[in-house]
Image: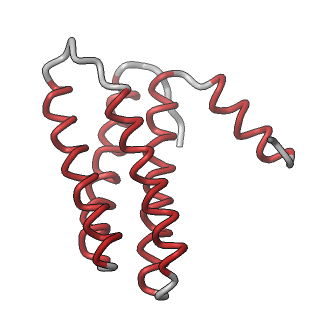
């Protein structure tokens, strides 16, 4: 249920986004949730950490499901995504930030790569 105008705006943004923009929005969400999970661990608020790391895992699962296996790069990306899932679970179970921080760096690098690819394809993703 949408309760605020901001939530309605977010829903409209997601529903009308181009595929590259939607992919980048997924990365943005995963990055935000991993950061919140790391902060939860640092603050010893394990409920917040768990909730956010699980949300990040859900987004990584969505990234996996969105892969097009007609392209060979998808096989490489699925391996990277599965590794990230493993590290997020490890971080959540052991309440250690190092694995989540590693995932955060991978997500940021992949996001930046997709932004550049989007620009080179002329889809014009603007930051």
Q: Nearer the viewer, residue 18 or 85?
A: 85
Drawn side of residue 53 relative to residue 9, left or right: left
Q: How is the image coloured?
A: secondary structure
Can you tell which quarter of the image residue 23 is in?
Answer: top left
Query: What residue sits 49% from the left and 60% below the top?
Result: 33
Q: Is residue 101 above or below residue 26?
A: below
Q: Position of residue 123 (x, y in %)?
A: 47, 21
Query: Residue shown at 32%/29% (left/top)?
Result: 117
Of the pair 76 and 45, the residue shown nearer to us: 45
Seen in the picture, residue 29 relative to 16 is either above or below; the reply is below
Q: Quadrant of residue 31?
A: bottom left
Q: Is residue 81 left or right of residue 35?
A: left
What number of labels is visible? 0
Instruction: Classify residue 25 as left or right of residue 82.
Output: right
Judge whether 30 appears above or below 46 on screen.
above
Task: Answer left or right for 73 relative to 57.
Answer: left
Q: Which residue lies at the image location 48% right of the left edge and 79% below the top edge?
A: 46
Q: Residue furthest top?
A: 70
Can you say which quadrant of the picture contains the N terminus? Answer: top right
x and y, in percent, of residue 14 in the image:
63, 31
Q: Position of residue 105 (x, y in %)?
A: 28, 60
Q: Position of residue 24 (x, y in %)?
A: 45, 38
Q: Which residue is rendered at x = 46% and y = 88% of the image?
A: 44
């Amino acid at each position: 249920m949408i309760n605020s105008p901001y939530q309605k705006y977010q829903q409209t943004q997601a529903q009308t986004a181009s595929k590259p923009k939607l992919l980048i929005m997924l990365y943005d969400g995963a990055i935000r949730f991993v950061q919140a999970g790391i902060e939860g661990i640092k603050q010893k608020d394990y409920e917040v950490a768990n909730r956010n790391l699980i949300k990040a895992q859900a987004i990584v699962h969505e990234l996996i499901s969105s892969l097009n296996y007609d392209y060979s790069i998808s096989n490489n990306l699925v391996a990277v995504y599965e590794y990230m899932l493993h590290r997020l679970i490890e971080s959540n179970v052991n309440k250690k930030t190092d694995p989540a921080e590693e995932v955060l760096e991978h997500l940021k690098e992949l996001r930046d790569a997709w932004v550049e690819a989007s620009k080179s394809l002329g889809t014009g993703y603007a930051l």
